Image (cartoon, rainbow, N blue to C red):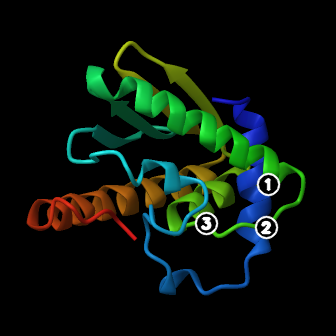
Amino acid sequence: MKNIFSLALVLAFAATSFAQDDKEKPYFDMENCTICKCMKSMDMNRIKWETHKIDNGMLMVMVVPEDMKAMWGTCKKNMDATFTKMESGTKMEICQFCTSFGQLMESGAKTKELDTAGGSITLVTSDDPAVVQKIHTMAMKVQDEHKKMMEMMKKNPQKQPG
């Protein structure tokens, strides 16, 4: 993925650029979120995604099945292209997850993304206790919303979030 600092700036910009009420938007929205849209064609039931609170922030782990790695690589390239457009000032629709991530960056959270043999690991951390609390709040929200998404997809495997 592109430089994580560019992503942070783009998401921070996006988080403050939209006047829509976030409560009206789905938390994960692969239908309408310009960033997440590339995941719409992927079988999200097969991707393992975990979010954990750690002492100074959160850890997100994504494991992509071997036969989906090429599709995931294409998705990441599409996300990079979206970030580039957003960096140039193009306003785009983003979901609550992407908005919240941008707000964390705007608050001073630090990110580190590591590509792994199985997918990726993202660390979101801070030395500021107030920012750590925001990160922990988001981590709990992500855990809750991810459970809801997976339950919805078990009931209707063809339905993607959004």
Residue at 80% across, 51% down:
85
94 and 133: which one is in front? 94
Among the two numbered marks 2 and 1 on one chain, the one whose residue lies closer to the N terminus = 1
Mark 3, residues whose alpha carbon is within 10 Å: few (<14), some, or many (≥20)? many
Q: Using residue 109 as the reference point, say whether residue 69 is left or right of it.
A: left
Residue at 35% across, 65% down:
161
The residue that disc 3 covers is: 94
Mark 2, residues whose alpha carbon is within 10 Å: few (<14), some, or many (≥20)? some
Among the two numbered marks 1 and 3 on one chain, the one whose residue lies closer to the N terminus = 1
105 and 85: which one is in front? 85
Q: CA distance from mark 1 to mark 3?
A: 11 Å
The residue that disc 1 covers is: 86
Mark 2 near mark 1, Cβ–Cβ under 8 Å?
yes
Residue 80 % position (x, y): 68, 38
Residue 56 % position (x, y): 52, 38
Q: Secondary structure at mark 3?
A: loop
The residue that disc 2 covers is: 91
Residue at 79% across, 44% down:
84
